[in-house]
Image (cartoon, rainbow, N blue to C red):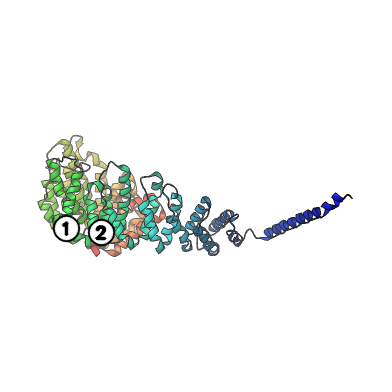
Amino acid sequence: MSRSARSILPLLRSLLLGAATASSMALSAGIVAGCADENDPETHVKRLDDPATLPQAVNRLVQFFEDAMTRDNKDRSGPTVKPLLDQIVEPMTQKCVAGDLDERTNSKLIKFLSDTRDPRGSACLIKALKDYKADSTEEDVRWAVRGLAATKPKDAAGPLLDVFTKLQHAKPKGSTISRDVHDAMLEINDPSWEGQLITMLGRPINDPKDVATLRNELFWQITAAELLGWQRSEKAVVPLLKVVLSPLKADAAATAILALTKIGKPAIEPTIALLKGEHKELVEYSQVESLKTAGDKPNAEQKKAAETAHVAAAALVLATIGRQESVQPLLAALEKAEDVPRAIIARELTKVPKTPETLAAFQAAYEKTPASLQVPPAGVNARAMLAEAAGNFFDASLVPWLVKAALSTRGEEDDVAQIRDVSLLTALKLMKADQIAEVDRLANTRSSSGTVGKAFEKEIKLAKGLLKDCGDKAACYVGKLGEPASQAKDTQFQGIKAAYMTGVLGTPDVRQSIIDAMPKISNAAVRFVSVSVIDALSPKGDADVATKLQKIVDDGEASKDAAKISANAPFKTVIYRLNARAQ
C-alpha cells in the first residue's frame, strides 16, 4: 500500500462512520415518527409548536373536528366533539393569537374556531377584528363575527364597534360582510356603544347624488337606530325623531319609527310636543331638512309644505307606538290639519285604541278629503287609502257609511272608480249577514266596466258563503282561519274575511285562539290580518301576548324558511306596540 493511500484511510473511516451515524439517526427518527399515533389529536397538537409542521397539523385537527361533528350529528356538545374541543381549542387559539402564521393557515384557524362556537376561541376571533383591513380580510371578519355573535364575549364589544365604523358597505367586499357584522352587533349590543351610535344618527346626508356616501351612511344609521331601539335608549329619542323628519334619510325612517316604538312611553312626550309644534328644535330641523329636497329656490308651495312636514311625521310615530295618550293630541292635530296632513293623521288613527271619538273623527276627515287628492310619495289616492284603512277599525258599523260615501263620490272617472272599488272591498271584509243587501247596492252600481262588483265576483261569493256558515259566531271564523281554502291563493279571501270577522265579533279572549291557529295559517295575507286583530283587541297592550308572538317569530327565523320569515314580518310592529302600550 502506498503512503498516500495509507494517509487517507483514517479520513475514509471517519466519513463512513459519520454516514453510518447519520443513517442511524435518521432511522431512529423514522422509528419514532412511525411510533406516533397519527389518529391521536395530541400528536398533531404537539406539531403545532414546529413552524414546519404547523400548517399540516392545523389541517389534520380541523379534519378531526369535522369528522367528530359528522359522528355527533352536528352537536358541538356531543360525546365525540366535546372531548376533542377540550383538547384542541386552547392550543389552536394560542397559535392564532401569537401570530406569525401564513395567511391561509391563519384564515383556517379563524374559520375553525368560529365553527366551534367555543368561548375559549374568542381571543383569536377578536384578534381577527383588530386586524381588519378593508378590501383584504373581509372573509376572516365574516367568520369571526359569526362566532362572536354566538358566544357574546364582553371584550368583543370594542373591536366589533371599530369594525362596524370602518366597514364600507358601498364597496363590493364591504357589502359581503355588512349583514354578518350587523347581526353580530344586534347579538352583542353593548350599552357602552350608546353615545357613538347617537352621534352616528346625527350625521347629515348633504348630497344624495353621492351614492357611495349615502349607502355607507344608511348602513351605519339604520343599524344604529335598530341597536338604540333594542337598548331602549331614552337619550336617542330626539335623534331618532330627526331621522324620521329628514326626507334625505327616508330609507332609515321605518327603522327609526320601530326603534321609537321599542322605546315606547319615553318617546311619547317629545313626539306630542313635535306634533303640536312646541318642540322648536325639531320643528326647525324638519323645515330645514324638507327644504333641502326643494333645490336652491323653493317655491311658495314647497315652503308651505315644509312648515307642516313635522305634523304627519309625528302622527306616524305616535300612532305606531299606539298608546292611549296619543289619541287626544292626534284628534286635536286632525282638527287643524289640511288635505295631505289630515289624510295621513286620519289613516294613523286606525292604529291607536278605538273610541267613538276616533271613529267619528276618521269619518269627518274622509269626507273633507277631495276625491282627487293624492298622498306622496307614491301618489296614492287619499280617499282610496282611507277607505282601505277603515278596515283596521274592525267595526261593522262603518259598512253603511262606506257604501253611502262611495256612492256619493263625485270627480274624475278614474278617481271615483278607484274609491268605489276599495270601498266595496273593505265593506265586504267588515259586513255582517244583515248588511249584505247594503253592500250589494254598491256592488250593483253601474261603472265603466259594467258594475262595481264585476271585478270582485269571487270575493263576494266567498264572503256571502262564509257569513252563511258562521253568522255571528267568532269561534267559527277562527276555525276558518286555518282551513286549506283560506291558504290557497284563489280562495284566500275566505281567510281574510274570516280574520276581519274575528276582529269585528271577537273579544280579547279570542286572541289566544288566533295564536293557537297560527301554525295552520300559511297564507301571508291571512297571517297579517290575524295579527292585526290581536293588535286591535289589545288597546292596553299585553306583554304576555307579545312574548307568544315573539316565539312564533323566533321559531320562523330558526327554521331558515324564507316564506315563514316573510309571513311573520308584520308581527314585529305589533309585538313592539303591545309592549309599548303595556309599559
Outermost right residue? 1
> How far from the left and from the top, in percent, is residue 53?
60, 55
Residue 320 as seen in the image, left or right of residue 53: left
Q: How many marks?
A: 2
Q: Is residue 205 visible?
A: yes
Closest to the observer: 66 or 358? 66
Q: Which circle's residue, 2 or 1, is located before the other in the chain?
A: 2
Q: Is residue 387 visible?
A: no
Number of other residues with Cα within 10 Å of mark 2, as a class: few under 14, some 14 to 19, many 20 or more: many
Query: Compared with residue 209, is residue 504 higher up or lower down, i.e. above or below?
Result: below
* Image quadrant where residue 280 sits: bottom left
* Image quadrant where residue 149 sits: bottom left
Q: Secondary structure at mark 2?
A: helix
For residue 236, which numbered disc appears in the image? Answer: 2
Disc 1: which residue: 272
Closest to the observer: 422 or 540? 540
Q: CA distance from mark 2 to mark 1?
A: 16 Å
Q: Name which residue lies at 41% across and 47% down.
A: 176
Closest to the observer: 96 or 81? 96
Q: Given the image, on which type of amino acid does mark 2 rest?
A: Ala
Viewer-side label of 2, 1: 2
> How far from the left and from the top, in percent, is residue 145?
42, 56
Query: Compared with residue 303, is residue 268 higher up or lower down, i.e. above or below?
Result: below
* Image quadrant where residue 533 sits: bottom left
For residue 101, which numbered disc appears in the image? Answer: none
Closest to the observer: 461 or 134? 134
Outermost front residue? 3
Q: Secondary structure at mark 1?
A: helix
> How far from the left and from the top, in percent, is residue 549?
32, 59
Q: Quadrant of the C terminus?
A: bottom left
Q: Given the image, on which type of amino acid does mark 1 rest?
A: Ile
Query: Compared with residue 502, is residue 373 higher up or lower down, i.e. above or below?
Result: above
